[in-house]
Image: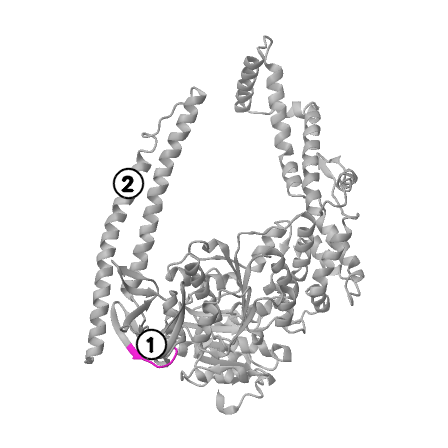
Amino acid sequence: MPHDEEWIQEQKRVDYTVGKMKKEKEELLSKVRAVRGEAQEIRNTFWEDVTVNLDEPDDVVETSASVRQQAELLAERERSYGHMEKNVKQLDRLIYSPYFARVDFHEEGETSEPIYIGTASYRDEDEYLVYDWRAPISSIYYDGVPGPVSYQAPDGRREGVMDLKRQFLIRRGKIEAMFDTGLSIGDEMLQEILGHHASTHMKSIVATIQKEQNRIIRDVSSNLLFVQGAAGSGKTSVALQRIAYLLYRYRDSLHSEQIVLFSPNQLFNHYVSKVLPELGENNMQQTTFLEYAQARVGKALKVESLLDQMEESLEGKTEHKETAQIKGSLEFFRAVEDYAKKLLEGGIIFRDIRFKGETIISKEDIAAMFYAYDESYSLPNRFQLVSKQLLKELERISKEERKKPWVEEEIELLGQEAFLAAHKYAERKMRQNRDDFSGTAYEKEFLARKIVNRRFSSIRKHIKQFRYFHIRAQYLDFLKKAPEFVRGAEGPLDAKTRAAFQEGWLPFEDTVPYMYLLDLATGKMMSSSIKYVFIDEIQDYSPVQLAYLRYLFPYSKFTMLGDLNQSIFGTSGRPQMELIKDIFGEEKAQVVYLTKSYRSTAAITRFTKEILQDGEKIEWFDREGALPVVAVAGSQEEAIAKITAYVKKLSAESNTVAIIGKSRKQCEEAYEKLREELDLTFIEKEYSGLPEGTILIPSYLAKGLEFDSVIVLDVSAATYHDEAERNLLYTVGTRAMHNLVLVSNGPVTPLLDKVPEDLYVEE
């Protein structure tokens, strides 16, 4: 198809830019080969170029300096090589697609200048051929329309006129689409991008960032930024672009390891893992609340996951629901503080320190040490001081222990290597002390100390880790006394917890109060270097979890992202934003609403929004597609047959087809039948990666993900019967980008009763 002159000129400009990039890449590759060769040469000849002489103290110092100098030379070459390799990868990305936009801009009295915007800056001598999307001037592309515009430059606000706004879709150095637009971001570009298949990794959205999303990305003044966004509104993508922007804006003072993202599960972590590297940035720290909790609690107790609790809830096991709500409240969190303050006066429960079945330091003696300190000493300070005292006492005990018969018996069993080391020690001691008698006493002293030290090493480790503090018993004591501190906390709050401790696990609802009590007593584990904390799926966090994160990161700025319509784990009854402001304070708190959904076709968004009570707030992007299908079956066999037929049909036009069940148990039952007919992967836990093709996945693991086609396993009244499951059904349906099928084994759930019949096809 012939192109107009404008298109031809733009393609020439792409060719020129790509040509410059390819030339620079070749030069860089040549340097990479040279530096890599130098580094290999240094490795091969490392010890040949080092002077090794250990005869005299001065020689040892000289040898150490020589080794260090050679190691530093190698490290410098490897750093240089790594930096150049990173630049080559960035050039590869730019050669494939050098930029995605052009804005023509001029200030008063000046001529209009074309500014090309891409995922990274590219400079040829003194001229910018491409501006990074995060550069100050690039904001006019996202926020402005042709006409008067302004942007915040490092030296102040700049004003001018945008004469042209043009968008490109460039692949392999060729322009595939080009649009001039008067909108913030033209619908044509969005249609082009959103019409593609889903991927097993989230994609960067820098070419299609909307004005309201750009506001979130470039916000640097808020201490707390809360993003309430509809399903598919780009919340997570915006969070990742925001991280990339912050790393660019504060590149001299902020590093990726100073940013932490709390995400819903490991599957999700894998899904988003490529976004930042594609933008030339290192990934931030990624974790889940469960991972953090397990590291803090240690290996002695297995922490119950939110997913395990969700599975119990979906299977109707709700006998501890009221207790869990009390333990998840802000009042309960503050009750832990009140209880810990009382421990300053007495009541801490210690363990005996035992060796070979005998108590060597009693818990009463430890308590006497602990409470001998002045009341002005905090609990963590006392633990530090008591541990030092205990280590000194252990050293005294170990000297006595060396004289005991069991040590003599173990000496007899030692190997030749130990006796050789003992003999060398004895010779050195005799030279130092000018002893004329036999070194046998020194040898025996050396071996006895070695044996006792080895046997005492685990006790030392336990003392340093405050294991003499009986945290489980202390927490159970708190639960017994909790009604003194918490209104309405009647009944046995410790029954489930006590049984769980005996079986070696920590219930989900006890995790934060348990960790908080441990932290208040012994000191918290946190990184003061963290400057930004991002929390995704914030609607699934209880008040105690949010309060605990605030306690862990008191000096960090927070970005929270969520959708209260997807609160599939239930809420505490109080508006979440109100709770968050209570915990974090009102100062510099900003709430941004993203109401437009871009993930799904208009047909799917129109359908899913009607599932909600207040879905009228959700807008859809005008991308047409097939109406959702509600397929009713008369038996389980017929339902499985319908699912199988739809998978085969949709697989022909989709990279990813997800069959989403309500619970893991429901998925397990379906898997046994579906696997006979279909090639599918059952994702039942936090799978490390997301495969292409057909997957079977429970609802709570699908949160945050998107798929070309979604088949809801069973939307019958028997499965989705509770009003509280409305949000869950909405969440499941909104995972679909292009096709949505809901299969019902028997009468359809009443949660779909209010969906207008013209918004779906019934089969």
Q: Amino acid at mark 1?
A: Met
Identity of the residue furthest to the front in this view: 109
How many angstroms separate mark 2 from mark 1 (CA)?
Answer: 50 Å
> Mark 2 falls on what kind of element?
helix
Position above or below: 761 against 702: below
Question: Percent position (x, y) of residue 176?
Answer: 27, 75
Q: Which residue is mark 1?
A: 162
Tell me the magenta residue range: 178-184
Left or right of 345, for residue 237: left
Q: What residue occupies the far top of the structure in this picture?
A: 436
- The residue shown at (68%, 69%) is 317
For the residue marked with disc 2, what is the amino acid? Glu
* Residues packed near mark 1 inside 10 Å, few (<14), some (14 to 19) or many (20 plus): many
Image location (x, y in percent) of residue 396: 70, 28
Q: Give 718 or 614, whichever is nearer the viewer.
A: 614
Q: Nearer the viewer, residue 682 or 182?
A: 182
Q: Tell whether position 179 is magenta.
A: yes
Q: Is residue 321 above or below residue 339?
A: below
Kindly report which numbered mark, 2 or 1, lies closer to the viewer in this rendering. Answer: 1
Residue 544 in the magenta stretch? The answer is: no
Q: Could you tell me residue 84's position as x and y percent?
A: 31, 51
**Could you say where residue 500 lies in the image, as x and y percent from the top left?**
69, 57
Q: Is residue 111 left or right of residue 705?
A: left
The residue pinned by badge 2 equals 38
Instruction: In this rendered view, identify the residue nearer to me: 224 or 461.
Output: 224
Rendered position, 291 above or below 607 = above
Q: Quadrant of residue 93?
A: bottom left
Q: How many marks?
A: 2
Q: Secondary structure at mark 1?
A: strand
User: Which residue is depicted at the point 59% across and 65% down?
Assistant: 307
Residue lying at 67% horizontally and 24% vertically, measured from the top left: 402
